[in-house]
Image: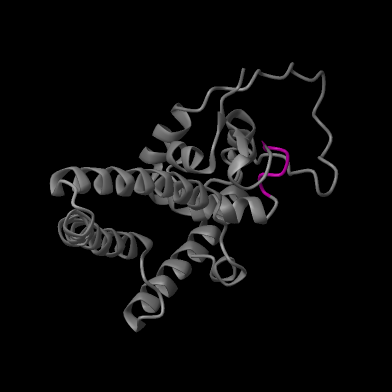
Amino acid sequence: MTRQLTATELAGVLDLSKGRISQLVSGGQLTGCYSGDGRHRRFDLAKVAAALGRRLDPGQMLGNGAKTSEALARIPAADPAPSPPQDPAPAPAGLGATELPSRDPSRYELAKTLKAEEDARTARRRNSEAEGTLVLASVVANETMRQMAQEIAQIESSVIRTGARRIADELGVDFREARVILTEVWREYRTGRAAVKAEEAEAAELTDDEQAEDF
């Protein structure tokens, strides 16, 4: 059976960002290649590979071939179709295009055009970063994790300790036992919330503004 992947897993296999996968879904380029919606969406790896076989990322087509080969090498090959007795008719409009021969000049021109578009998107992204209107998700994630770690440490070292001391003094119970109980309750809460937030992150989609930027 063909592998069914989440958006995050598919992005890793194809060496793309999760945001790019969302763009491909919104643009209809992966129609028929997945089932479900949101965090329950699962992609058929072989179908995705076939759908993108003629639409590789422009940077990969001209300047990143090694990664393309590595990504596609991890994709299981679909069952080959029997050879037709004659040249196949052009695909109906809206159902995909016939793959161009490897030496067809149009193939190179198409790749060249797409590469230019990719370069333009890259330049626009860098300009936005320099102007402060765009922040890399990795930078935000690292800073958020740093601040959360500080807050968690503060809660465990100060808030829980203070709460345990008040319980011990006001109720006449052992301070250490009160602290152990509060710590266990807090960590159970953290574990549950972490699981919920992980599911929310998996189901997150690009906003209309983010899709319009097409970085």
Residue at position x 72%, y 40% in the image: 98
Residue at position x 51%, y 47% in the image: 202
User: In the visual, does 194 lie left or right of 158?
Assistant: right
Task: Establish if 46 lies above or below 173.
Answer: above
x then y, percent, for residue 117: 52, 65
x then y, percent, for residue 33: 67, 37
Between 160 and 191, the one nearer to me in the picture: 160
Magenta-highlighted stretch: main secondary structure?
loop
Task: Establish if 45 lies above or below 64.
Answer: above
Task: Judge whether residue 31 is colored magenta.
Answer: yes
What residue range appears in magenta?
29-34
User: Which part of the image, by quadrant, shows the N terminus?
Assistant: top right
Between 29 and 117, the one nearer to me in the picture: 29
How is the protein colored in the picture? one colour
x then y, percent, for residue 60: 44, 47
Residue at position x 48%, y 32% in the image: 72
Between 182 and 87, the one nearer to me in the picture: 182
Residue at position x 73%, y 44% in the image: 97
User: In the visual, does 197 lie left or right of 135?
Assistant: right
